[in-house]
Amino acid sequence: MKLSARIPAITIPDIMIIRITVVLLYLVSGNLKWFSAEMQWVDALTSETWLAFLPSWLGHDGASYFLAVIEAAVAIALLAGVIFPVLGIVAAAGLILSSTVMLTLLPEIMSISLSGLILKEIVLLVAGLVLLRHDIRRVKRHAPCQRRLS
């Protein structure tokens, strides 16, 4: 008996659930960065890591505002990726980049209890990879056929 592994294709509703969930997470976490409690956490995060240049360049609260705008832009681009897959690719790349940056910061700031944050960033990283793969396939599928010059 021969065993073969098949990876099931993710259907459109599954992708929409992933996309909408990530959009909601980014909108909520991005909007929280406008408030003082989250600003203090961002300040503590950036002061102890390689992102320490952000407060000096953007001001005490500017780093938090900057991250809020980035997260809102990724969320909006992810949502627009439903119609425009190229924007979905850009947003998924931003999602992967932001999760990777956050995961690289974690060894430097282990003084804070971060088990939930680590899990969240890993899930967002995987969701970004899935969305990136899906949107790249959509772009390839709808790309115009190229003719050979003969």
Image: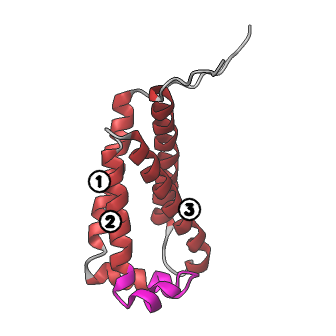
Q: Position of residue 110 (x, y in %)?
A: 57, 77
Q: Is residue 41 visible?
A: no
106 vs 28, left or right, is right
Tell me whether the residue at label 3 lies in contact with that at label 1, contact meaning CB atoms closer than 8 angstroms. Answer: no
What residue is drawn where x is 49% and y is 78%? 112
Q: Could you say whether the residue bearing mark 3 is in a helix, strand or loop?
A: helix
- Comes first in the chain, label 1 or label 2: 1
- In the image, which disc is placed on residue 29? 2
* Dot 2 alpha-carbon crowd within 10 angstroms: few under 14, some 14 to 19, many 20 or more: some
Residue behind mark 1? 24
Q: Residue furthest right?
A: 1
Which three-letter amino acid code belongs to the residue tagged 3?
Thr
Q: Position of residue 13 (x, y in %)?
A: 33, 30
For residue 53, above or below residue 24: below
Which three-letter amino acid code belongs to the residue tagged 2?
Ser
60 vs 6, left or right, is left
* Dot 1 alpha-carbon crowd within 10 angstroms: few under 14, some 14 to 19, many 20 or more: few
Tell me whether the residue at label 2 lies in contact with that at label 3, contact meaning CB atoms closer than 8 angstroms. Answer: no
Give the magenta range.
44-63
Helix, strand or loop: magenta stretch: helix
- Comes first in the chain, label 3 or label 1: 1
Q: Could you say whether the residue bearing mark 2 is in a helix, strand or loop?
A: helix
- Comes first in the chain, label 2 or label 3: 2
Q: Residue furthest front?
A: 150
Q: Position of residue 106 (x, y in %)?
A: 56, 72
Q: Could you say whether the residue bearing mark 1 is in a helix, strand or loop?
A: helix
- Could you say which quadrant of the image residue 36 lies in? bottom left
What residue is drawn where x is 36% and y is 79%? 64
Quadrant containing the C terminus in the rendered view: top right
Q: Position of residue 65 (x, y in %)?
A: 33, 78
- In the image, which disc is placed on residue 100? 3
